[in-house]
Image (cartoon, rainbow, N blue to C red):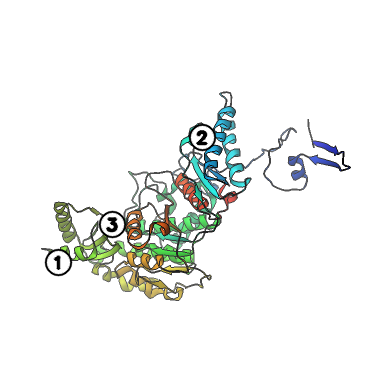
Amino acid sequence: MDGLRRVSINCFGFGGTNAHIILDDAFHYLAERNLDGKHHSVNLSPPTTPSLFDFGIEVSSQPSDLASNETPVPPAQRHKLYVLSSHEESGISRLCAAYSLYLEEKSSPELHDDELEQLGSNLAYTLCCRRSKLPWKSFLVSPSVAKLPSQFEEDFWTPVRSSQTPNIAFIFSGQGAQWFGMGRELLRFERFSKSLEEADGYMKAIGSEWSLQTEFLKDEDTSIINLPQISQPLCTALQVALIDLLKYWGIEPHAVVGHSSGEIAAAYALGALSREDAWKLAFHRGRLTSAIKYRSPNLKGRMIAVAISREKAEKFIGNLEGGTAVVACINSPESVTISGDESAVLELEKVFVAEGIFARLLKVENAYHSPHMKVIEYDYLQAAQDIQVLEVAPGRTMFSSVTGKSIDSQGLGPDYWARNLVSVVNFSEAMKCLLHCKNVKPEILLELGPHAVLEAPLSQILDTETRSKSRPVYVSMLYRGEDAVATSLEAVGHLWTHGYPANLELVSER
């Protein structure tokens, strides 16, 4: 039937209660009033323009700002987030069994792929946005409706009981974890892609000769992401884009901690720096560190991560036969990063291998947080002179890996960023201070960076500083080699199950 559909419903009760309701179909009701809304009404009139329906949590379209890029965005799987809640723990299993059966009955062989996708999208949207949030919660992320019945039976996360909003601390990694393709699937989210587009434009305006967006889309053979002038601004731009995406989804931190250059993004998440100043600090840090080999050709630096304490590391350093090195980063009570002359670092690597000590050379060509950085300290300070420190909203705190203590936003001026470049990274002490701070003591640690590189150090710190009952939950937005949409939706799922009121309706936008 063409046009408006209308139905009249009435009820005449024996007790004298009479009711008469007239209902119009949602499609025409909204169209006549120029309103948008989510509905299942179908327009039976002859089509004039394509109809767009927005259901479920999926990302499949390519944003217009990247559509003309020389390197097209690779096709992504349509991952969706399915959330579940119940009054009791066992109720989650019953819900999963019911939805599994429902999908098996609905997924007939006659359905086209688009119809299957809409079936999954409808279910995801309904679970996220049209169900009460009960105490016991669980979730799963799936790329395929065909896999959903078995996933509901086997792959849903262990139910969690939550009723209060938890404190979240954002944890930011520094350089060394970058890899080609990191986060690229998230380009389907407009807020993420727009942030990277604006970062690209800003960096070109202050002197960048390369395209941030193009580098994000290169394959492993053509990527030059490990060059410092590329990796530093790219990692910070990625972290800023993740912050922007999370903020759009209603997820903001109570506290922040950054490891090395990760403090730049941490200061932005805190609200102490603008995006432009964060991008500027990262760009000039990358530009100047890449110039060290030209300014001081005799300085060849390397860094190595080692699974030993600071005290033990300094003993090994004291026995070096040639070159100099220092403990550059105290990652945890049993994990440090050593930085210095390439000859010294390679000598230490051989010693650690012989001693059976875990050691891994980092993918950087400079000796960060060592005397090598003194070559560019003054120039970096000058490049940072015009950054503006902003007033931070009440209730947020940054814990500095330069001082190992909480820091006021006014302390994050140009001098601080020069100190960040040359000083020892005391990440372990900064985390210890965070974990014992009563005002912002976190229940969730969310790592923002190219990979979950801080998971192991954080686990060691938590083993030392927390009891099992008060141990925060660790979650990472991205993992090396994994689909960024899938891992990010899983991160949101974990936050939701632990009681954080993420805006799942905004997460569900295409």
Is the residue 57 above or below the residue 228 in the image?
above
Camera-side mark, 2 or 3: 2
Q: Residue at x 28, y 64 (%)?
A: 329
Q: Of the two numbered discs 2 and 3 on the same chain, state the one appearing first in sequence.
A: 2
Q: Residue at the front extreme?
A: 15
C-alpha separation, residue under disc 3 versus residue under disc 1:
24 Å
- Disc 2 marks a residue whose amino acid type is Leu
Secondary structure of the residue carrying tag 2 is: helix
C-alpha separation, residue under disc 2 versus residue under disc 3:
42 Å
Residue 438 seen in this snapshot: yes
Residue 291 seen in this snapshot: no
Q: Residue at the left extreme?
A: 321
Contact (Cβ within 8 Å) of mark 2 with mark 3: no
- Disc 3 marks a residue whose amino acid type is Val
Packing grade of label 3 (10 A; few <14, some 14-19, many >=20) is some
Quadrant placement of the N terminus: top right
Identify residue for label 1: 318
Residue 97 placed where, x, y %?
54, 34
Is the residue 295 above or below the residue 31 in the image?
below
Residue 351 placed where, x, y %?
14, 56
Secondary structure of the residue carrying tag 3 is: loop
Residue 183 vs residue 134, the one in the foreground: 134
Identify residue for label 2: 148
Side of 220 relative to 149 (left or right): left
Side of 454 relative to 389 (left or right): left
Residue 52 vs residue 107, the one in the foreground: 107
Identify residue for label 3: 364
Camera-side mark, 3 or 1: 1
Task: Tell me the quarter of the picture where residue 419 sits.
Answer: bottom left
- Disc 1 marks a residue whose amino acid type is Gly
Quadrant placement of the C terminus: top right
